[in-house]
Image: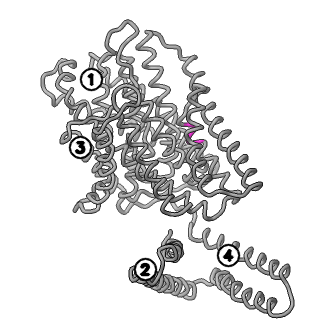
Amino acid sequence: MSPVRQQDGKTAFVLGFSWLLARRGAGYRFGMESVTLSLFLMVAVVASGWLSRLSPVSVPTPLVQIGLGALIAVTTGAAVDLKPDVFFLLFLPPLLFYDGWKIPKEGLFRDKGTILQLALGLVVMTVLGVGLLIRWMIPEMPLGVAFALAAILSPTDPIAVSAIATRVPIPKRLMHILEGEALLNDASGLVCMRFAVAAVLTGSFSLVDAFGTFLWVAAGGIGIGVAVTWVITRVKGMISRRIGEDTGAQVVISLLIPFGAYLLAEEAHCSGILAAVAAGITMSYAEQTGQVMAETRVRRNAVWDTIQYTANGIIFVLLGEQLPSIAARAANVVRLTGHSDPLWLVGYVVAINLALIALRFVWVWVALRFTLFRAARKGVAVRRPSLRLVAATSLAGVRGAITLAGVLTIPFLLPDGTAFPVRNLVIFLSAAVIVVSLVLASVGLPFLLKGLELPPEPQAQAEEDAARAAAAEAAIAAIEHFQKAMAVGGREGELYGEAGVRVVDLYRRRIDGQHLSGAEGARLKRLEEAERRLRLTGIRAERETFYSLSRSRALSDETMRKLVREADLLEARLTSG
């Protein structure tokens, strides 16, 4: 597949996402307004990055995207008919799949106890504590509805957390815990919400049924996600070994896996969200077989990065686009609560956010004390983290797309045909909590994390250096084996011998560099950095020459693209991580 055709495919895929979400009316009918609105969403995603960088103060891109979405809704007067089932299907499976694919597994398993405490125990505490608070503040809201609102506010959002991390330097280990929690607490929060809503609809609740359903939803979703990825990768590998690997087909298959896992899990009444996450984690293990061609990996990563950037942006633009219509119903919402002043709504939102942060702080602090107590009983010396780190963990519990989509699934009517109690108020409070949590995290995290000393972590650079040295030794052994297998007489043998010496010399320099320390090691690092900068300077000069020759018609377009692609790959290798 040519690079141009690949880019066209990515653009069509992204536009397809927007078109499906923007369709209005019955069925798949759409008009010029829907297409125009979809294009506005795409432009807003692009513009948000520029505006975020141009801002004199550090403003997270999600907040800019929410603002642009609201601006689009106000200026155009158009509104996306956001269908929760379509929203869940199009956006969440690929994004959660990719997050599960890329999350560091050693951090996930190292802090599994902390992650599970946050993803399960904290969710239950939030449903009970915040639910009772909401019921106390708003007596007009039935207890079941209050619990449903608290449940849908309990899951943190990996998409929002990742977006915050692009502008706020969150420590790696804390970020891994937050990502792991956000990937797992969706199922517990959504299950709690479904049972609270069912209690409102039927007037009854069974704790035994709820617990059994949760086990089936969670275990079934994880099992289906693992099975789908394992089966597809095995079949794909068998076909590739038999007839060869098609790069384009491999990329498309990776795009289909999260949707397949999600749909199968939902059909089995399990958690499609956990299925997508489990499929992504399984995909990372399948990748370790190394059976995919290098070209496939490069193109696939480019496609997935494009999808992640665009879909993340559209989610927050859509959230902003929904805010004006939600705010338009605020006056009626205030009357439902028995107050005439809209400032009561602000008070509700502030109180709910403070309660979420306070409960999270208490839970993290207690869990930390319990961890230190267990370590002390085992005789393990553990450095006690500061309260600032606990506060940062509490403030980083950002709400996002899961909360928005989940609250929109609340039915309009009860079984007897009457309106669902205070549905508009629930939606308004949920949307406002999302925005406020983003603002608080954006403002508070830089202050809390500035100059914060963290417990020591394994030295990543030493681990990387050791891996490079081991890989270099394996490369030398493979080259020497290949030389012996290709040993021929005459000029051909001399060529292989000379080429082998040149290639092996590069690897031996890498190995020798790992044994240097102190001043010699520091000088080698500076030498490598100077060499990297010089090579980058040369590569950029090469690329500009290729473009110049192409403009003067001294180089064909096809040859120019080939040479520029080689230069791009070399530059990407030198500038990565």
Question: Sequence order check: which comes first, mark 1 or mark 3?
Answer: 3
Tag 3: amino acid: Ile
Spot occupied by residue 89 in the image (x, y as percentages of width and height) = 48, 36
Q: Nearer the viewer, mark 4 or mark 1?
A: 4
Q: Marks 2/1: CA distance?
A: 70 Å
Pick the residue in front: 483 or 559: 559
Tag 1: amino acid: Met
Spot occupied by residue 72 in the image (x, y as percentages of width and height) = 23, 43
Q: Nearer the viewer, mark 3 or mark 2?
A: 2
Q: Is residue 275 magenta?
A: yes
Tag 4: amino acid: Ala
Question: Sequence order check: which comes first, mark 2 or mark 4?
Answer: 4
**Which segment is the magenta one?**
274-278
Q: Residue 137 — which label?
A: 1
Image position of 434 (left or right of 533): left
Q: Nearer the viewer, mark 2 or mark 4?
A: 2
**Residue 331, located in which quarter of the rendered image?**
top left
Instruction: Tell me what residue is drawn at x 60 percent, y 71 percent.
Output: 462
Image position of 382 (left or right of 168): right
Query: Does residue 376 appear anywhere in the picture?
Result: no
Q: Residues within 10 Å of mark 2 (few under 14, many from 20)?
A: some
Residue placed under numbered mark 2 in the picture: 550
